[in-house]
Image (cartoon, helix red, strand yellow):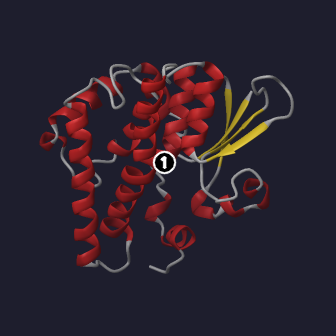
Amino acid sequence: MIDLYFAPTPNGWKISIMLEECGLPYTVKPVNIGAGEQFAPNFLAISPNNRIPAMVDHGPPGGGDAVSIFETGAILLYLAEKTGRFMPADLRGRYSVTQWLMWQMGGLGPMLGQNGHFKLYAPEKLPYAIDRYEREAARLYGVLNRRLGEADYVAGADYSIADMAVFPWIMTHKRQGITLDDYPHIARWYALCRARPALQAGLSVMRDAVKRNPHDDAQARETLFGIKS
């Protein structure tokens, strides 16, 4: 059994989607990030960066003690290795998936996170910051659109953990002020992924909690961002 320490955010959904796609049994351990539960000692023991998601696998390959993992890229790679799914076995295919996974982790996710922060949550609207991250978001969308003009999925011909990592961030496009009409190849891919029943099941985890977005609460924003609104 797998314990998934989770909040309904793009990073959390990456892992719930993968678990549903693989059909692995798991238990959701909700982490109220707006209340600061990510700073609790028992959570820090498995996620020292005090970020969700984190995972504990009580039945790791080869047996033995439970394995705890933090960082979404590491979790996705672990689950792909555990199941033998959504990661090609050949060298070129494997590293195509790996590099696009790293692109999401190092670029798309952080930059869209900053774009959303300065547009929606920053107590002071800073034109320089808003412009900076709008431009970077547009650049990254352009990179992805060009890529998906060359291949059916992010890393090539087949759906993979790279798609699972990218999709939840693209799902925020309307809130980010981005229209997929400007990115037709992303729009095609987005519809293709969204039609997958397992992806929909992964997105449904703690769906009701999304209606209580912690970012929309002043005290939660102080907890999350360390600043007073």
Choose between 42 and 65: the one closer to the eye: 65
Residue at the spot 76% in from the left edge and 27% down from the top edge? 60
**Residue 132 visible in image:** yes
Give the class, few, some or many, for how many residues have Cα within 10 Å of label 1's Cα (few <14, many ≥20).
some
Q: Looking at this rendering, what residue extends furthest in the right direction?
A: 64
Choose between 144 and 181: the one closer to the eye: 144
The percent position of residue 144, horizontal first and vertical second, equals 27, 41
Q: Is residue 20 left or right of residue 180?
A: right
Q: Amino acid at mark 1?
A: Thr
Residue at the spot 65% in from the left edge and 24% down from the top edge? 82
The percent position of residue 128, horizontal first and vertical second, equals 24, 77
Residue at the spot 19% in from the left edge and 32% down from the top edge? 185
The percent position of residue 188, horizontal first and vertical second, equals 21, 28
**Image quarter for residue 150?**
top left
* Total numbered circles: 1
Residue at the spot 60% in from the left edge and 38% down from the top edge? 75
Residue position for label 1: 9
Image quadrant occupied by the N terminus? top right
Choose between 9 and 131: the one closer to the eye: 131
The percent position of residue 124, horizontal first and vertical second, equals 33, 80
Which SS class for mark 1?
Answer: loop
Q: Looking at this rendering, what residue extends furthest in the front direction?
A: 91
Q: Is residue 67 left or right of residue 36?
A: right
**Image quarter for residue 156?**
top left
**Residue 177 visible in image:** no
